[in-house]
């Protein structure tokens, strides 16, 4: 497979995931079952979404730019806020966790490479909108955060949190040798005391109901991250965990703002 100007249609296992024609029988069935799964579980895990050859290509691309990652240690509540000093220290809304944020920004990912081809591919957006029950989706307009590669090195972790975005799309590019597990507690965002109690239980170390995923390279995940508490456990071993993060929104031109860019990328676009 050539590396320059790749076509996304050549990257995806279209026999298994017929994204090219969602109106046709097989495409419609894929959408229907994907939608049911997301509605039930808050997550859709598509293993082998990209072909083994494409996964090899994408892993190599990610490894080649991983040194461009910006790293920062971020302390935050599960709601991704700095914490509220007026609340008791044991309140779910003020307890702090830490995240080792490391990511390669979109403008450091080759514009003619496979990850970018997948991100830009219109049928992928149509598929995501269909399984999420949304009218249409647009790629983030942010020149840094629209597409990223999350990099977690040994000992690094993403603390428990709810996403700000209503859903997240990730592609595993390189799993670590051990650790680096994506861990989540489905559907606890009730907005009331039950939610806060559930958050406190998880932060206190209670593992009841937690689901662990450690997928191989080439697995696509579509996740309602605003509804489910989730984290990435510490990476173990010398191999960094590399995950592509594809960001889309209901409206065109969504950006992050200079403050977030400075915090998560160390610069402003
Ligand atoms: O790296 C992952 O698998 C998930 C990352 C995540 O939860 C996030 O970036 O908000
Ligand atoms: Fe998240």
Image (cartoon, rainbow, N blue to C red):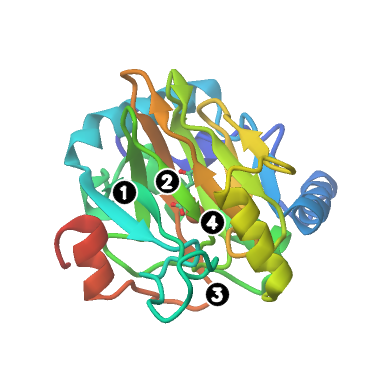
Query: Which residue is pictured at 42% across the width and 24% down the height?
Result: 176
- Going from the N terminus, do you reach mark 3 or mark 4 first? 4
Q: Residues within 10 Å of mark 4 (few under 14, many from 20)?
A: some
**Disc 2 residue lies near ligand 1 with CB under 8 A:** yes
Judging depth in this view, the residue of 73 and 86 nearest the camera is 86
Judged left or right of residue 73, residue 158 is right
Q: Residues within 10 Å of mark 1 (few under 14, many from 20)?
A: many
Identify the mark at residue 201; answer none if there is no mark: none
Residue 185 image position (x, y, % from top left): 67, 50
Q: Closer to the observer: label 2 or label 4?
A: 2
Q: Which residue is mark 4?
A: 168
- Going from the N terminus, do you reach mark 4 or mark 1 first? 1
Residue 207: name its quadrant: top right
Judging depth in this view, the residue of 110 and 145 nearest the camera is 145
Residue 108 image position (x, y, % from top left): 21, 47
Q: Which residue is mark 1?
A: 101
Is label 2 in contact with label 1 (beta carbons under 8 Å)?
yes
Say if 58 sits above or below 171 in the image.
above
Identify the mark at residue 250; answer none if there is no mark: 3
- Distance CA(mark 2)–CA(mark 1): 7 Å
Residue 3, can we see it?
Answer: no
């Amino acid at each position: 497979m050539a590396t320059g100007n790749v076509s996304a249609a050549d990257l995806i296992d279209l026999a298994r995931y017929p994204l090219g024609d969602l109106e046709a029988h097989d495409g419609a069935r894929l959408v229907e079952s994907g939608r049911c799964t997301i509605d039930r579980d808050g997550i859709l895990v598509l293993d082998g979404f990209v072909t083994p050859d494409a996964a090899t290509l994408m892993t190599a691309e990610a490894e080649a730019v991983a040194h461009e990652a910006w790293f920062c240690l971020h302390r935050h509540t599960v709601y991704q806020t700095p914490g509220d000093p007026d609340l008791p220290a044991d309140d779910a809304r003020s307890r702090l966790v830490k995240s080792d944020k490391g990511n390669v920004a979109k403008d450091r990912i080759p514009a003619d490479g496979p990850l970018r081809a997948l991100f830009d591919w219109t049928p992928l957006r149509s598929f995501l909108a269909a399984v999420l029950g949304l009218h249409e989706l647009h790629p983030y307009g942010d020149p840094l955060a629209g597409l990223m590669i999350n990099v977690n090195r040994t000992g690094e972790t993403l603390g428990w949190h709810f996403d700000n975005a209503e859903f997240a799309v990730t592609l595993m590019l390189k799993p670590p040798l051990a650790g680096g597990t994506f861990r989540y507690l489905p559907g606890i965002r009730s907005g009331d005391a039950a939610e806060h109690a559930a958050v406190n239980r998880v932060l206190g170390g209670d593992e009841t109901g937690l689901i662990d995923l450690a997928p191989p390279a080439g697995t696509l995940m579509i996740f309602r991250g605003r509804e489910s508490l989730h984290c990435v456990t510490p990476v173990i071993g010398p191999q960094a965990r590399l995950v592509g993060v594809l960001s889309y929104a209901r409206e065109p031109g969504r950006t992050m703002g200079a403050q977030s860019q400075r915090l998560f990328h160390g610069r402003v676009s």
